[in-house]
Amino acid sequence: MDEKLYRELGQLTKDKSIWKQNIPYVASLLKNQSPKITAKAMWLLGEMGLLYPQEVAPYTKEIASFIISDNDLLRERTANALGRIGRADYDLVAPYFEELLSLAGDKSPNVRLSFIWASENIATNTWAVYENCLPIFAELLNDENERVRMEAPEMFRVLGKRKPEFVRPYLEKLEYIATHDEVSVVRIHAKGAIKATLSKTIKEPDAKTQNKQVR
């Protein structure tokens, strides 16, 4: 039964034209006893929420409740879903933002990875909420898991493109990682974060320069 339902959700995932009308049905599966089905439903609700945030809004509290689940996969998927919904409308996930941040220290590397990915999604359109959160991501730059370390610099790249002043205090650390990390992808991503931050800084003239240009 679970396999049949899982395949059904897979087919639904492919047909975005019927997503909106199926949001209540998919949300009902959050109560499914199978973690595999619940996880799939949660992931799909996240993707639906990116397109139809207001229609998914009634279910965000239930999605966020899985942040404290004992199941690693469900914690992973709640991060995925909240990230996508939050990218579309941060206000819908704002009540759960502090809880979401707690996943940065999760025991599962997959959850930590999904947390970074979710944060990148939210920061794309609502970067200001991360102004005081950079120490959390700086810690993840040194994560013992390679995949987490590969993704961590991407958060600095996303923020560096939008608010370079958030990232400037971490440029020295990123430079060190870009030179010394044993994993090439980590080094490449660190260089990308540095480049995004510096290029944005160069493109933005300071107030004096702007005044001269006006004159």
Image (cartoon, rainbow, N blue to C red):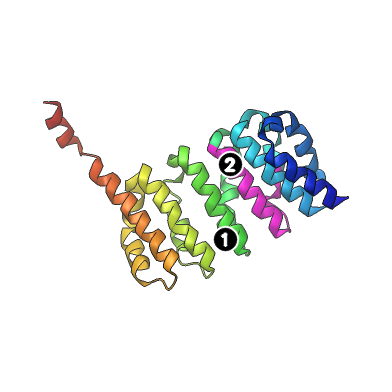
Which residue lies under the disc numbered 2? 84
User: Closer to the observer: label 1 or label 2?
Assistant: 2
Residue 100: tell me if it is visible: yes
Q: Position of residue 76 (x, y in %)?
A: 65, 54
Say what amino acid the circle numbered 2 marks: Arg
Query: Which quadrant of the structure image shows residue 92?
Result: top right
Side of 29 where 143 appears, left or right: left
Query: Which quadrant of the structure image shows residue 44?
Result: top right
Q: Position of residue 16 (x, y in %)?
A: 66, 34
> How far is the residue under mark 1 from the one under mark 2?
20 Å
Q: Which residues are magenta?
A: 63-87
Instruction: Name the residue located 52 percent from the left edge and 62 percent from the top edge.
Output: 148
Q: Secondary structure at mark 1?
A: helix
Which residue lies under the disc numbered 1? 105
- Which comes sooner in the sequence, label 1 or label 2? 2
Mark 2 nearby-residue class (10 Å; few <14, some 14–19, many ≥20):
many
Q: How many marks?
A: 2
Residue 140: tell me if it is visible: no
Side of 42 where 115 appears, left or right: left
Say what amino acid the circle numbered 1 marks: Gly
Residues marked 1 and 2 touching at CB (< 8 Å): no
Instruction: Name the residue located 43 percent from the left edge and 60 percent from the top edge.
Output: 138
Q: What mark, if any, has residue 155 been given in the picture?
A: none
Q: Position of residue 136 (x, y in %)?
A: 48, 57
The one of 182 and 119 positioned closer to us in this rendering: 182
Q: Secondary structure at mark 2?
A: helix
The one of 148 and 1 positioned closer to us in this rendering: 1
Dominant secondary structure (helix, strand or loop) of the stretch shown in magenta: helix
Magenta highlight on residue 84 = yes
Instruction: Name the residue located 31 percent from the left edge and 62 percent from the top edge.
Output: 172
Q: Position of residue 102 (x, y in %)?
A: 58, 54
Query: Which quadrant of the structure image shows residue 97?
Result: top right
